[in-house]
Image (spheres, rainbow, N blue to C red):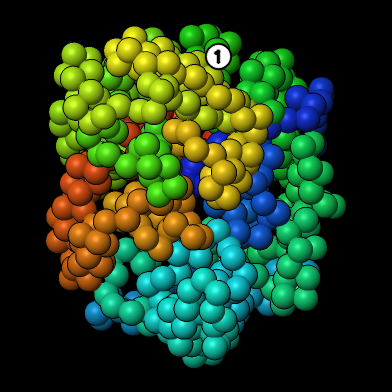
Amino acid sequence: MRGAKSAKWVAIAAVVALGATACGGGGDSGSGGGKSNGIVSMEIGEPQNSLVPTNTYETEGGQVINALFTGLTKLDGNNKVVNAMAQSIETKDNKVWTIKLKPGYTFHNGEKVTAQSFIDAWNYGANQTNAQQTNPLFSHIQGYKDLNPGEGKKPKTDKMSGLKAIDDNTLQVTLDGPFSAFPSQLSFTAFVPVPKAFFKDPKGFGEAPIGNGPFMMKGKVKHNQEIDTVKYDKYPDASKIEVKGVDFKIYSNLDTAYKDLVAGNLDIDINVPTSGLPTYKKDLPGRTIDEADSAVGYIGFPIKYNKAFQNADLRKSISMAIDRKTIAEKVFVGARTPADDYISPIIDGYRKGACGEACTYNPSKAKELYKQAGGLPGNSLEIGYNADGGHKEWVEAVANQLQQNLGIKVTAKPFEQFQAILNDLDAKKYQGAFRMAWSMDYPDMEDYLRPVFSKDAIANGSNYSGYVNEEFEKLLVKGDQAPTHEEAVKIYQQADDVLLKDLPYIPVYFYTLNAGFSENIKSMTVAGHQVLWDTVKLG
C-alpha cells in the first residue's frame, strides 16, 4: 500500500496508499503473449516517483521494484515472512542482528551483491538530505538520528553507526533498541540493495534501475505507457521462474484495463474495478483470485494545516454518519468488508469491533455530535480522491451519506492520477478531506501504526494528516522494545486505541483482493498485494 501498502502506500504503502492505475493508452492490443513467447503483461498505474527503491512508497512503482530486486526476506503465499537473499538471521536480544547472505547473487550489470550493497542503500535511504519517501522505516537502526538532525540542519555524517559489514556475506545490524519485527520489516522493498552505479547517477538510475532480482529492465521507463522487463538468466532461482519477462502496462482507467484483460490483451490485473466485480468470475472462468487483502481504506483529514478538522468529535461525527455496510455490500458488491479497526483482519493483533461506537452507523447521534463539535465552516466538506483508482463510486456514496445524514454540502473532488493528490498532500496544498488507503509493507501490526500516524512519518513518510500524539509515540517505542511478539501486540493495541479515540483517519473498509488473469496463465499467487513471480505458471 502503499498502502494498502500504500498507501504511499500505500503504499500505503502505500501509504502504502493504495493506488491504482494510470494509463496512456489503455493497454495496446495483442501484447499478452504468454503462450507465444513467455512474456506477460500486467496492469499498473504511473508510479509517483522514479524507480529508486527507497523512494518508492506506493503500490504502482512497488510492483516493478518487486520484480527487479530481491531483499533479505520476502512473503510466501500465506503472507508469512521467509528468507530470500538471507541465508540466516540471528539475534540474542532483538537488538543486534547478524545476517548471513546467500552466495551467487549479482546485480544485472554483473556486480556482486555484498553486505556493503545493503549498507550503502540503507544509508542513502535514511539520510534526510536525500529526502527519500521511506526514510522513517530506517529509524530503528542505530545512528539514524545522526542522519536526520531536522529541517534546516545538515547531517554531520552519511553513515549509520549500526551498520557493519563483517565480511562480504555477513551483515551486522545494531538497532537503537529491541525490535522483534525487524526480519518482517526487511521484506519491504525499501530494504533491497543497490549497486555502485546508483550513487553515480541516482536520477538516471530511477529511469532504468539495475536490480538483483529475477527480472531486469528492457530499456528505460516509458512514462504513462509501459515499463518492460526481461528475465535475468543469472538470477540464482531463475530455473524456478517460467515467465520470460513482464511488461508493466500503465493505465489511467481501471475499466479500460479490465476490458483489455477480458479481451486477452492484458495478462494480469490485480485491481479488478468496481464495474467488473459483479461479472468478473463469469468473464474469467477459473482465472480469478478472491481473497482477504491486507489493505484498509480510509477518509483522512489534514489536521495539522486545516483547523476546521482539528476537533476529534467532529471527525467522529463524520465517521458515525457513514454507512459502511451499504458501501461494502452495494457499492463494492460484497468485495469489501466494513472496517472496525485500523489493523487488517489478516494481521495478528486485529480486534473485531475495536473501533466501537465511532465506526458504528448512527446518523441521528452523528448529527447531534456534529452540532456539538461546532460543525464545519459553511457547513461544507470536500473529499479528494484519485480518479485513476476506481474510487469515484464509493467516495461519491460517502459524500451522499454525509450530505443526507449531517445536513451539509459535500463535494467529491477527483484528481486525475494518484500521484497528483499525493503530491498536493505532500506539499500541504490540499485543504479538504481525502481518500487514502494503506497496504502493508510487511505483515506486522507496527506497520499499520508508525509509517502512517507517527511524528517521524510527517516529513518523509505517509502521515498526510500531520497527526501527532505523544502518548501514541511512547506506546510505539514500548511496543518495539517488548521481548516477545505477543507482548508487543498487546502494547501496539494500546497505541491503536489512542488512534481510535483521535481518528486522524476514519477507517471505512477492509480490502479484498479481486484479481484476474488471462488464458496465457494457468495459475499464480499474490501476497502483500504483489505477484509472487515464482508461482506464475504459464498456460
Left or right: 221, with 142 as reference point: right
Which residue of the protein is positioned furthest toward the front in this rendering? 378
Q: State how many labels appear.
A: 1
Q: Residues within 10 Å of mark 1 (few under 14, many from 20)?
A: some
Q: Position of residue 513 (x, y in %)?
A: 45, 30
Q: Is residue 29 above or below residue 167?
A: above
Q: Furthest residue to the bottom?
A: 166
Q: Is residue 32 visible?
A: no
Residue 398 in the image: above or below residue 188 = above
Residue occupying image coordinates x 15% and y 31%: 356
At 58% from the left edge and 38% from the top edge, which residue is drawn?
A: 421
Q: Position of residue 420 (x, y in %)?
A: 64, 39
Which residue is denoted by mark 1 in the rendering? 276
Q: Secondary structure at mark 1?
A: helix
Front-most of 397 and 313? Answer: 313
Between residues 157 and 2, which one lies in front from this camera angle? 157
Position in image of residue 318 (x %, y %)? 30, 26
Kindly identify the amino acid type of the residue bearing the numbered disc 1.
Gly
Horizontally, residue 172 falls left or right of residue 531, namely left
Check the picture and name the quadrant holding the C terminus: top right
Q: Residue at x 32, y 42 (%)?
A: 310
Answer yes or no: is residue 253 visible: yes
Residue at 47 percent of width and 26 percent of height: 382
What is the quadrant of residue 145 in the picture?
A: bottom left
Which picture quadrant has residue 119? bottom right
Residue 511 sits above or below residue 229 on the image: above
Q: Quadrant of residue 42?
A: top right
Above or below residue 276? Residue 236 is below
Q: What percent of the width, then of the height, locates residue 377?
A: 39, 28
